[in-house]
Amino acid sequence: MSVLSLGELAREVVARARPGEQVEAFVARSNSTTVRVYEGELESLTSGQSHGVGVRVVVDGRQGFASAGLLDRDAVLEVLSEARANAAYAEVDPCVGLAEPDGVPLPELDLADVAGVRDLPEQAKIDMATYIEARARGADPRIESVRTTIWSDSWGEVAIASTTGIDVGSVGASCSVAVSPIARDGDDTQIGFAGDGARRPGDLDVDRVVNDAVERATGMLGATKPASERLTVVLDRPVAAAFVGIVAGMLTGGQVVKGRSPFADRLGQQVAADAVSLVDDPTDVRSLGADEHDGEGLATRPNTLIACGVLSGFLYDTYSARRGDVTSTASAVRGYGSVPVAGAQALQLAPGDISQDELVAAVGEGFFVDSVSGLHSGVNPVSGDFSVGVTGRRIRGGVLGEPHREATIASTLQRMLLDVVLVGGDLEWRPGGTGSVSLAIADVALSGT
Amino acid sequence: MLLDADLLTDTLYVALATGGEFAEVFVEDRRNQSAVLDDGRVEELSTSRTRGAGIRVVTGDTTGFAHTADLTPEGLRAAAAAAAAASRSGGSRHPVALGTGTDHQSGALVMPETVDKARKVELLRRADAAARDGGTAIQQVTARYNEGRRRIQIATSDGINTGDDQVRTLFAVSAVARGDTGLQTGRENVGRTVGFELFDQVDVADIAATAARRALLKLQARPAPSGAVPVVIGRGGGGILFHEACGHGLEADLVAKGASVFAGRMGERVASPLVTLVDDGTMDGEWGRIATDDEGHQARRNVLIQDGELTEYMWDRLRATAAGRASSGNGRRQSYRHLPMVRMTNTYVMGGTEDPDEIVAQTPYGVYVAELGGGQVNTTNGDFVFGTLEAYLIEDGRIGAPLRDANLIGNGPEVLANIDVLGNDFAMGMPGTCGKDGQGVPVGDGQPTLRVTALTVGGTAA
């Protein structure tokens, strides 16, 4: 096996570029551990190292790509030659090309505590998962069992080098826990789920995870199918995070320049209620999505997407930026196995100034959505049609009432943005990296009986 | 075979050195080639390669697992030792000697990797042209060609030494149409466990035309209804319903943990007597077809529900061993980096006797779904959703106006009981990727035209 560092390996690939070729190498390596606990016993302990390389070759306006989950020198050189061969079959596109350094210095972020994750003994991970399971089982007499309790962590590094002068590297580490307790009352069985992620084991909020998961399981006991009606819905923070994630996807360069975004020609226009402001800021270290550089090696920077309801910008990688005749916003996301595409890295909804309880009280009559399903099957980010399965509670007289399940909510993403009536001040950083708040959205169709 | 029996035997010895009861080496070598046309241009060809091994050691209820991309004797030994570390029962056992084993061959007639890339690119251009022939409202077309070859080998301390060579070829087209009502999308995929001969069986122009037709149709679509209505699902368009409504709930790992509404119901009536549900990994050419599962057990045809009565769950080695029975050939995993678990293969409901046109004619009002997209289920309470890709209103027994995309939601046991008629027109549907606990595996599904007396449609129309 090679003893080269990832950066050296990436530079060695780049050094083999032929005249007239642009070559980029993205090399990654990570170690991960997953612990699953069931009924107080270790169910499985999984560990391993993953690594790989992705190479882009651009020649005469044609791009080719190849990747391998291998890092030995022969495999890496084969990847380069495959990428070169693939380039010959693409059609010429003058906008194709690698990122070029744009003068923005890399932010200095205190992101990784590799040793804190790497050096944690396996037994400590098993103990943590066992503790969480025991807490969940003991939290409520109706908790019958816990389907699974998981600890997982990973630490690793990435290096990117290119013939255009990109040469960056970074390290990362994170850990997470998740638990799914099962509650039973007579014939009624319901499952809850909650998780948390952090850069350091000590930052995991175990109390919140346990309470949240147990509440989600027991809270659904006795839930019924609601009557169909139009009303105001309140999206709890995990749901609001999923919602803005889909919206941000519609504001990415790839969708915009290829005519797949209903917002493509709306820049500068009111697309959301005044209370809605959305930024993507990978330099904010509170987000687990924070990073010093994007997937093409450019320095990350904050990008405002929606400011007080006005569409203010899109997220671009190098290719889509050239197509749109703008500059990259350093929003390329990727792994070693894929070419970069523009995407959000660390979304953040600007918080309002009321608590979730106050928001529910202000809504008065409505439906509180605590989980959604079918996001991939019922949401069309091109047309904007939005229809998802939900569980939650009826809001009556400004407080949470009876639980409901087997229902859907529907509208369009365009309407929902404009129909936001209240924004919570209950900012929470989700494991997916989004800073989310509760959102109240008017005039949504709830379908049940 | 990917690795020779002596190397695997040595590795299994190391894996059992700490007292493990069972050890397994799963070796995988996977190559993929894809080509994408987007925005009128052959955008990119890409190639990927992965290779590695996952080693599992089971002791009592505990599994140790380690994966490595290093297939040298040293790399395998290190991974075996790591997997064995979770087992602390002491002592050591010896694996059963491995024979030369069984190496299943791919049924592909033309290995895609032997076909010139220029021919693959030509398919993309043909599809793009065919989709754009749908009309000037077609604003954007994406065509994707994908070939995959996955060679695997499973060697276990029980003496299994089995290989499989799984070849898959897929062609997918999505189209965007623009009209007065904004943008709409349509898509169609065809994928089979065959080689490049797929394109002797299907014309990519037809795939593209279907995608374009769906997008154009939805420009005229009205919002879907909101609330519970009768739903007719066309042949081959809705196998996902059974995949979600009961397929996952019949997986023995979920059953064993009380996380399935079908736990404890063996032998009971769980569906309309019209319903016979089968999971069949042996269906030649279908997307979920395998010769052996990822634990070295031969794929089988398993009848899960017979005439409405629950007859069988699906099993992997772990759950089958705990229950004192044989695996049903449903132990699958995404890659060598993953532990196997109980997964479906090709899951379908057998055909009935009714004329499908009559089923629609005898439905005064409801929704007709020609094609469903993905879905998701909560197996614990049985609630599941699935989305429409092509749907229409049924009025006065006739298929009428097209409907915009929506999710439908139902409860598995209730929906299975509320199937009141099955057509005589069974067909398999589009290739799918089933996700469970973060792992994706290729699956197929199928059904005849059928009617559910009431399903909640998640539209916006009153």
Image (cartoon, rainbow, N blue to C red):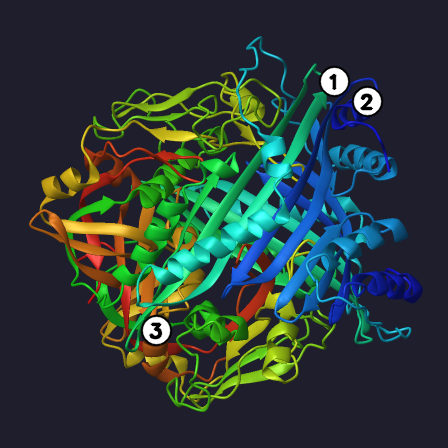
Q: In whole angstroms, how far apart are the C-alphas of marks 3 and 1? A: 57 Å
Question: Mark 3 Cα within 10 Å, few/some/many (few <14, many 20+)?
Answer: many
Q: Nearer the viewer, residue A358 or B169?
A: A358
Look at label 3 and name its amino acid: Val
Look at label 1 and name its amino acid: Thr
Give the number of marks: 3
Q: On the picture, is A168 further left or further right than A106?
A: right
Where is residue A391 drawn, in percent x and y? 28, 57
- Is any part of residue B237 visible from this angle? no
Question: Mark 1 Cα within 10 Å, few/some/many (few <14, many 20+)?
Answer: many
Look at label 2 and name its amino acid: Ala
Residue designated by label 1: A163
Label 3: chain letter: B
Q: Earlier in the sequence, mark 1 or mark 2?
A: 2
In the displayed structure, would residue B76 be above or below residue A62?
Answer: below
Q: Nearer the viewer, residue A352 or B242?
A: A352
Where is residue A105 drawn, in percent x and y? 56, 10
Do callouts 1 and 2 mark residues in contact (Cβ within 8 Å)?
yes
Which-is-in-front pick, marks 3 and 1? Answer: 1
Residue designated by label 3: B232
Do callouts 3 and 1 mark residues in contact (Cβ within 8 Å)?
no
Label 2: chain letter: A
Do the residues indicated by labels 2 and 3 lie within the same chain of the protein? no
Residue designated by label 2: A17
